[in-house]
Image (cartoon, rainbow, N blue to C red):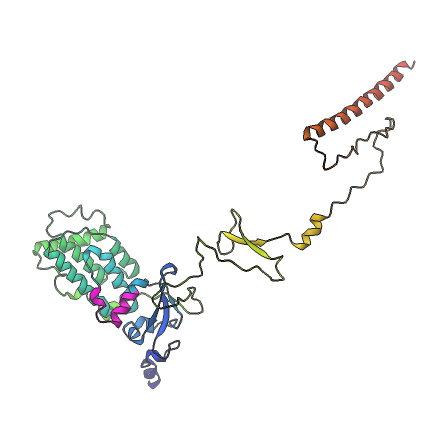
Amino acid sequence: MDLIRNALSHSPIDLPGFSSSGGVTVTVGKPNDAEEFFISSRVLKECPALRQNLDFAEGSCITSLDASIFRAIVESIETKDAFKKLSFSPQDALKFAKFWEHANTLGYAAFQNRVTEKFQSGYRELLEKRASVQPEQESITYLRNHVGFHSPAEQLIIDSYAGLLQWHTDISLKLQALSPDTALHIKERWDIVVSSRGVQDRVVGKHDAFRVSKDQMARHRRTIQMLPPSKAILGRPQTPGTKASTPLHSSSQKPALPRSESTSSLTQRIRMMIPGLNSTNSDGETLVPDRVPSPMRPLLSTPPNPRPRSSASDRAPFMPPSPHLSFRTPQKIPEDDESSDDELVDYFNDVFKGKMSMVEREFDSKTKLLDDKP
């Protein structure tokens, strides 16, 4: 029991990967919008989901959180006046849904309840002005995808829409763009608020249905997606709060890569773009040899061996010898000859015609001799 008690009583400073100052530096966000943050022991105390994550250590990368929202949460913990700058209203329910969900992921129930109170305050201001609002599905869908159905935040948004529509006699047109179940829930709450003339408007007061308890936190908790330092793919920025650099190259400027000096490669390589061919990292440019590999040079530079002449006669047995004319070995045309293709065709046609006329004469003479015989 003492061992378990000591393990549970360890402070963040005792956890592996933490600096002596009681904090850890991590990268938060997607590759294009990532930022580096120093997480102090105070932040870790308020956000138990970070402290309990086994992969949370120096150089880790949290990919499931938005950097701008995470920054606002951290600043609200470190600075008392930071939270006062935040505002939430039913007119921007998606913003409220994202902040509430991020605090839920971090296990920061106190922040969720403070955000809820801010949202209710914005609702009361709109209610006094009798301002109308168009219900939207995006915030409800976001909460259902990231938290689950019927969360306190979802109920608060539905109640706020119903309360701000209580002066309308027909809200069917306002609910057309919503999913059937969302429209039904708003209609049910609208009927209750209208029939009670606003007395049963739960958003006006501090209703427990919208507050987060430990049981609700455990039921709707989402696991943080985190890459340990050994698998983190993001580069660390120079100063905290700046966007992290990524190994992905910009499409407008390609970094110069050194030529390959490896003996295993064919030759030095150069970068070039070949249409239809991508490198292994889906880059539009690829490295190719800057010259023909040495094993192929003799094959390209050495002319082919001349074909040995056949010992067989070039003419038929009944044809007289013609040393000045050969069908198999026509007259060789020099490579620098500027004769056209038509001239070459005419040349070979003349040779063929000459041979054919000679064959005809030979055939006529043989036929005549046969005819003269008795």
Horizontal and vertical percent position of residue 111: 23, 68
Q: Nearer the viewer, residue 40 or 140?
A: 40
**In terms of image quadrants, where is residue 160?**
bottom left
Residue 12 x, y percent position in the rendering:
33, 78
Total marks shown come to 0
Q: Is residue 34 above or below residue 11?
A: above
Considering every residue shown, the one lying at the far right of the view is 374
Picture quarter with the C terminus: top right
Instruction: Estimate the x, y position of residue 362 in percent, counting from the top left.
Output: 85, 21
**Residue displayed at 60% across by 62% down:** 262
The answer to whether residue 182 is left or right of residue 65 is left
Please provide percent x and percent y for residue 154: 22, 59
Q: Is residue 80 left or right of residue 236?
A: left
Q: Quadrant location of residue 224? A: bottom left
Q: Eyeballing the image, is 8 above or below 302? A: below
In the picture, measured across the screen, residue 16 lies left or right of residue 331, that is: left
- What is the magenta range? 70-85
From the viewer's side, name the closer residue of 14 and 219. 14
